[in-house]
Image (spheres, rainbow, N blue to C red):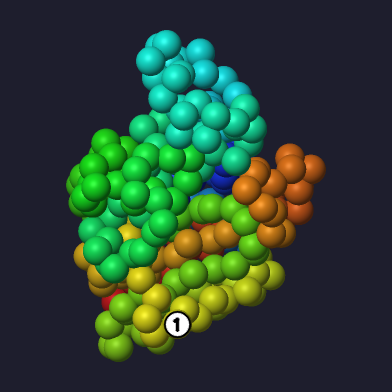
Amino acid sequence: MLVGSHHGREWLSSILLVRMLEEYAAAYRAGKPVGEYPSESLDEVSIWFIPMLNPDGVSIQQGDLSNLNVLEKAAVWKMNRYSRNWSRWKANAKGIDLNRQYPAGWKEVMSHETKPTYQFYKGGQPLEAAEVKALMDFTKEIDPLIAVSYHTSGREIFWHYKNKRKNMARDYGIAKKTAELTGYELTFPEKEAVGSGFTDWFITEFRRPGMTIELSYLVDETNPPLTVFPEEWKRNRLVGIMLVKEAKQLHNN
């Protein structure tokens, strides 16, 4: 399962996932491989694409408030500290950071934000955001072998969150292959690192490999420029189909 745009300003991940879906589907229809990987492997392993978990946040970040009523517009303006700089918007339309909403490590997450705002507010309790609850329910329904959450920025891969010792080599191996494919850095968190992100929850709930992949070079509180997309697509084009092969091996084992 591949998920994009937990955060409003990270819509580059949605473009990448839609491009990946289109290319894989076209290769499958034509009976052609994707890179070195045969597209007919999709007969055995499905990829679930969720390109944009936070459409409201993406719209706000792009300055489009047309889907909000007058009261909602006033609320998001207040949550944006009365700034018209929407490009920094990260939360959903209710001012909740969706990737700080998952129950794995939620209590331990520290934040200076104690009320809804444009970024970093983890909510009053886990699963408060409807988007997060829907993704959790769907994940349990399809029971994926591997889950990836695409974000921006930093060209890093996070793969480790309280992984069981017996799964460590397996999960590291898949993350390492992904790092070699993308040229991204594998990140090893501190022992005291806290979670509340989607892949933190997936790893602890399913005991299976989960990765957070950060696209693009580092940017501040905004979206990466669209000009970086060709480079990020080149780096990530084969990630999904490579993980199909890895998932097949997991299933067979």
- The local secondary structure at tag 1 comes to loop
Looking at the rendered image, the quarter that the C terminus falls into is bottom left
- Residue 21 placement (x, y as % from top left): 53, 41
Q: Look at label 1 and name its amino acid.
A: Glu
Residue closest to the eye, 119 or 200: 119
- Residue 251 placement (x, y as % from top left): 30, 68
Task: Please tell me in which quadrant of the rendered image residue 219 appears.
Answer: bottom right
Q: How many marks?
A: 1
- Asked if residue 227 lies left or right of residue 12, the reply is right
Q: At x 44% / y 20%, what residue is drawn?
A: 74
- Residue 138 placement (x, y as % from top left): 25, 44
Which residue position is annotated with label 1? 190
When the figure is inspected, residue 155 is found, relative to residue 1, above or below; the finding is below
Q: Residues within 10 Å of mark 1 (few under 14, many from 20)?
A: few
- Residue 76 placement (x, y as % from top left): 45, 27
Q: At x 39% / y 76%, what residue is drawn?
A: 193
Residue closest to the eye, 237 or 89: 89
Using the rendered image of the protein, determine whether residue 166 is visible from the camera's viewpoint: yes
Residue closest to the eye, 27 or 68: 68
Q: At x 55% / y 29%, what residue is drawn?
A: 82
Using the rendered image of the protein, determine whether residue 18 is visible from the camera's viewpoint: no
- Asked if residue 14 lies left or right of residue 220, the reply is left
Q: At x 59% / y 53%, what residue is drawn?
A: 152
Residue closest to the eye, 96 or 59: 96
